[in-house]
């Protein structure tokens, strides 16, 4: 056996050990990535919902949900639609909505994509749906006796993030949280609310 061949065998063996060790150390995250991949292959909403529900279970669910949320808008439009549909459904946990909202805050360039889907799935015509949301938020933030310390749910925050984005205030949408929303909303009402014009329903769930 030549010296070169022995060196090659040794290199392959060491590489195999290294790869095996890396896979073992990162086996949990690899399993999560594989679960994300399977969710992206789902051909029906029900199949996707079962995959998303798996991420919501177990003591490690917060980290799993962050991994799942980070997969949104990374190239699989089918996955994006299924996930946005699940997040806006009654089946989603608040933990997933939180991970999704915080993911949008970390990647504000995706907020217009979220606002597009939000308008498409609005139960009322977008203008009427926005008006009902603003009426509710006005009562909380601008009424004569606003509820002190009233926080929004993560579902309500996702609504607000979409509305702020539709007005062109993407930066504020990214910085708004359930805790600080009232201050941001009041400033937006005074300075940017008038920029929210007619909002039509998009022809498709996601931008081309």
Image: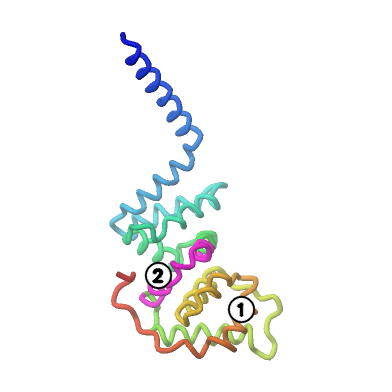
Which residue is disc 1 drawn over?
Answer: 184
Q: Considering only order in the chain, which callout, 1 or 2, is on the residue closer to the N terminus? A: 2
Question: Could you classify mark 1 by the number of other residues whose Cα lies within 10 Å: few (under 14), some (14-19), or many (20 or more)?
Answer: some
Looking at the image, residue 153 lies above or below residue 71 = below
Residue 92, horizontal then vertical, whole percent = 47, 62
Could you say which quadrant of the image residue 146 lies in? bottom right
Question: In the depicted view, which residue is nearer to us: 124 or 81?
Answer: 81
At a point 46% along the width and 84% down the height, the residue shown is: 130
Main SS, magenta region, reads: helix
The C terminus - image quarter: bottom left
Inter-mark Cα distance, 2 to 1: 21 Å
Which residue is disc 2 drawn over?
Answer: 113
Disc 1 is placed on an element classified as helix
Total numbered badges shown on the rendered structure? 2
Left or right: 30, with 201 as reference point: right
Could you say which quadrant of the image residue 181 lies in? bottom right
Residue 74, horizontal then vertical, whole percent = 38, 57
Looking at the image, residue 41 lies above or below residue 192 = above
- What colour scheme was applied to this rendering of the protein? rainbow
Disc 2 is placed on an element classified as helix
At a point 61% along the width and 70% down the height, the residue shown is: 178
Residue 140, horizontal then vertical, whole percent = 62, 83
The span picked out in magenta is: 101-120
């Amino acid at each position: 056996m030549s010296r070169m061949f022995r060196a090659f065998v040794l290199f392959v063996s060491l590489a195999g050990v290294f790869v095996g060790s890396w896979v073992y150390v990162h086996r949990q995250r690899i399993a999560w990535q594989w679960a994300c991949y399977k969710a992206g292959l789902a051909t029906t909403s029900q199949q996707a919902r079962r995959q998303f529900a798996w991420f919501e279970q177990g003591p490690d669910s917060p980290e799993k949900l962050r991994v799942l949320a980070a997969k949104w808008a990374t190239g699989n439009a089918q996955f994006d639609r299924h996930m946005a549909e699940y997040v806006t459904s009654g089946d989603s946990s608040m933990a997933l909505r939180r991970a999704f909202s915080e993911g949008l805050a970390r990647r504000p360039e995706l907020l217009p994509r979220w606002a597009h889907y939000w308008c498409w799935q609005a139960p009322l015509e977008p203008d009427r749906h926005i008006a009902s949301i603003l009426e509710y938020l006005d009562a909380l933030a601008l009424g004569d006796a606003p509820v002190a310390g009233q926080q929004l749910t993560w579902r309500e925050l996702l609504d607000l993030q979409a509305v702020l984005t539709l007005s062109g205030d993407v930066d504020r949408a990214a910085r708004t949280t359930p805790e600080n929303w009232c201050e941001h909303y009041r400033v937006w009402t005074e300075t940017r609310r008038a920029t929210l014009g007619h909002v039509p329903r998009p022809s498709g769930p996601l931008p081309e």
